[in-house]
Amino acid sequence: MYHQSTTFKYDNSDEMGKLFDLEAAGYFYTRLQNPTNDAVAAKICSLEGGVAAMLTSSGQAANFYAVFNICEAGDHFIASTSIYGGTYNLFNVTMKKMGIECTFVDQNLSEEELGKYFKPNTKLLFGETITNPTVKILDLEKFARVAHSHGVPLIIDNTFATPVNCRPFEWGVDIVTHSTTKYMDGHGVGVGGCIVDSGNFDWLAHAMNYPGLTTPDDSYHGIIYAEKFGKGAYITKATAQLMRDFGSIQSPQNAFYLHVGLETLPLRIERHCQNALAIAKYLEENDNIAWVNYADLPSSSDNELVKKYLPNGTCGVVSFGVKGDREHTVKFMDSLKLVSIATHVADSRTCMLHPASHTHRQLSEEQLREAGVAPDLIRLSVGIENVNDLLADLEQAFNNL
Ligand SMILES: *Cc1c(COP(=O)(O)O)cnc(C)c1O
């Protein structure tokens, strides 16, 4: 059933009134919720093993809502430095203007060292299962232990792994976000995001820290989300307050495209991983290459983390550096014929990006290094084409150098 509709009809006035009191579940207006979106969110929720989920207009909106749902002016949170450039800007610049402060930490620090960054007003810990663009693996259980020992939830952006390769809730993560624009859609068709709640974080046990969930909401006749909605409290609040006020809803048409994409997700992910491993091995043996990072390579320092969290493979993204200067890198990229240069990543078609010249160009050299993005780093997003065609394209571009 697909609902390309902004509005919904009710049998009587009382039925509609109950919706606005949050006394009955249903649909008011597509700025907040739509049946198509809910069906697709429920599917992702089930893939992740969560209890409630919502779609957002983009991955950026998902990460913003996920944090802003439990943080307000005067609050603080902690995020790994090694996160997507757009999320880094959101946390470091835009949310700072809202009075919310984020401290960025090296995700490889020990539990004890990470613990030193927590303050009385710290509300959450944030990271990515597989970091974009550096494709490093986060130790989910370590992060979960640190977060929980400080009484805050762990929020993980699971975009690159997808629930096909990793289900963060099984490792103690509380809330998962996605840019569905990437593998879930898979065909570069629609921008979108998703937030999934495990329902495991006990807001009432930390009631003083999360007043938005544990004190009355005057805009809905004084309901208390954590009491009234239990495990569904977090997603209900994000829908009833944040979607109502900001309206970053995914268009139902895009939700439909996402639904189609999800049907082939397991097949595609398997192929992405096979192709990426073959290409990473080829690059590792190529004389033009300074370094290669792909966590599934036996040479990767992330081997132990891969075995534990991503035993069936990581993702299709490989990062590497070409020997020589920046012009050399650019010449290599410009010589490619099948592989396209695109901002996009995690798509069926192979594409490539040089963060220092493209997505991360607003960051200083120092910020780049802090984010673990080497100036020569190329992010190669390996698609599902025939791997021999991809290898041949790389080979001819190297021969052109
Ligand atoms: C792309 C991406 C985002 C942002 O998602 P959009 O859909 O582009 O807004 C967030 N996190 C990760 C890991 C991403 O790759």
Image (tube, rainbow, N blue to C red):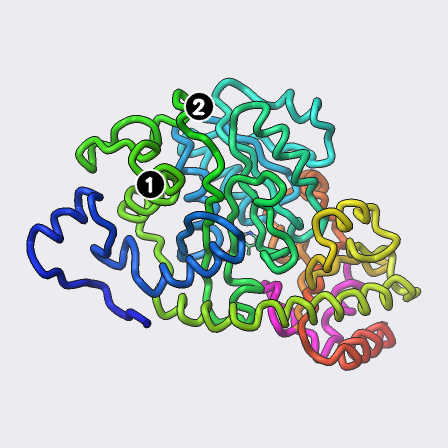
Task: Find residue 302 and report its horizontal and vertical position in percent.
Answer: 79, 47
Residue at the farthest left position: 13
Whichever of labels 2 and 1 marks the residue nearer the N terminus, that label is: 2
Q: Identify whether 325 is placed above or below 70.
A: below
Nearest the camera: 196 or 65?
196
Q: Which mark is residue 69?
A: none
Is disc 1 surrounded by few (<14), some (14 to 19) or many (20+) residues within 10 Å? many
Tell me the residue that label 1 is attached to: 237
Magenta stretch bounds: 326-349
Nearest the camera: 269 or 46?
46
The response on whether ligand 1 sits within 8 Å of label 2 is no
Query: On the image, which quarter does residue 355 sit in?
Result: bottom right
Q: Identify whether 170 is placed above or below 339.
A: above
Query: On the image, which quarter does residue 119 sit in?
Result: top right
Are circles 2 and 1 on residues that touch, CB within 8 Å? no
Name the kind of residue labelled 2 in the image. His
Look at 52% across and 33% down and name the residue there.
153
Task: Find residue 346 and report its horizontal and vertical position in percent.
Answer: 62, 64
Quadrant containing the N terminus in the rendered view: bottom left
Instruction: Give the alpha-carbon distance from disc 2 to disc 1, as whole Å.
Output: 17 Å
Is disc 2 surrounded by few (<14), some (14 to 19) or many (20+) residues within 10 Å? few
Q: Which mark is residue 206?
A: 2
Where ligand 1 lies, by image quadrant?
Answer: bottom right
Comparing labels 2 and 1, the label whose residue is closer to the camera: 2
Horizontal side of residue 44 vs 329, given as left or right: left
Nearest the camera: 109 or 325?
109
Horizontal side of residue 350 vs 100, given as left or right: right
Task: Find residue 196 and report its horizontal and vertical position in percent.
Answer: 47, 49
Q: Report helix, strand or loop for mark 1.
A: helix
Look at 73% across and 59% down and name the residue there.
313
Name the kind of residue labelled 1 in the image. Lys
Query: On the image, which quarter does residue 125 sit in?
Result: top right
